[in-house]
Amino acid sequence: MSSIDDKEIYNDKAGRYKSMSFLVNSYLDYMVLHISVLPIDKNELQYSVAAPGVNPELSMNRWGGSASGYDFTWDKTWKTPKQFKVWWQRIVDPDEYAKNKIDARYLIKETERGTAWCEAIITINNPLPEEPGYFILHFYPDGHVDAYISELKELEAEQPKVKFEDRMKLSVLREKPCLKEIPNPYYGLPKPVQQN
């Protein structure tokens, strides 16, 4: 997590920290953007780690959406079960979202049109493997998110839990965009230089 000092990780001679990539599986028919994982007791993006967003169109023929990348650092002094917060932006109305000409997350307090910001609590129940593979997130259409840390080369655990042809059988949250909707967490933060 970004709340762990980078110098401390770099100088980790005792092997206290383990880094792994995120793997995000989405069983949704809409895009999931700007995913952030935070400590359970924090409410600021400065303490978060970014996970890759998912566009289901990229792999709809196979699973309905998956992406991997970015790094998560696990402190081996943490005990499981361990909870984290997940924040993400979801597309509610693709036509309205397409009218957004710029990425206004940092400039406008209101949530961008055609989208909603969501929060879920995830729990890592399994102990940290000796050689971790991925920090895996599963986004379900009923609004909940599952998480798991796989063992390196544990191919079965890294597969989506729901195949594309079975996705229509899942229950769907219809009455609101998220189980818990939150305000735009980016508003007022300095925009990263590479995005200017």
Image (tube, helix red, strand yellow):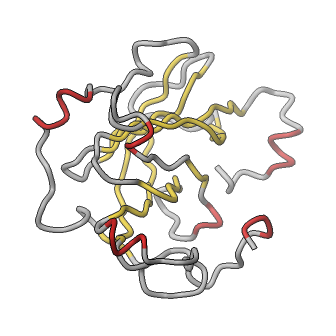
Residue 111 appears in the picture as rendered? yes
Residue 76 lies left or right of residue 42; in this view the side is right
If the image is split into quadrants, where does the C terminus sit? bottom right
Q: For residue 63, which quarter of the picture?
A: top left
Q: For residue 174, which quarter of the picture?
A: bottom left
Look at the picture and state if 73 lies above or below 126: below
Residue at 35 percent of width and 70 percent of height: 116
Look at the picture and state if 44 lies above or below 60: below
Residue at 53 percent of width and 25 percent of height: 128
Name the one closer to the observer, 91 or 146.
91
Residue 81 appears in the picture as rendered? no
Residue 79 lies left or right of residue 26; in this view the side is right
Residue at 59 percent of width and 58 percent of height: 48
Name the one closer to the observer, 194 or 85.
194
Look at the picture and state if 30 lies above or below 9: below
The percent position of residue 14, horizontal first and vertical second, equals 81, 27
Residue 63 lies left or right of residue 109; in this view the side is left
Residue at 56 percent of width and 75 percent of height: 186
The percent position of residue 109, horizontal first and vertical second, equals 49, 87
Total marks in image: 0
Q: For residue 166, which quarter of the picture?
A: top left
The percent position of residue 192, horizontal first and vertical second, equals 74, 69
Name the one closer to the observer, 154 or 168.
168
The percent position of residue 81, horizontal first and vertical second, equals 40, 36
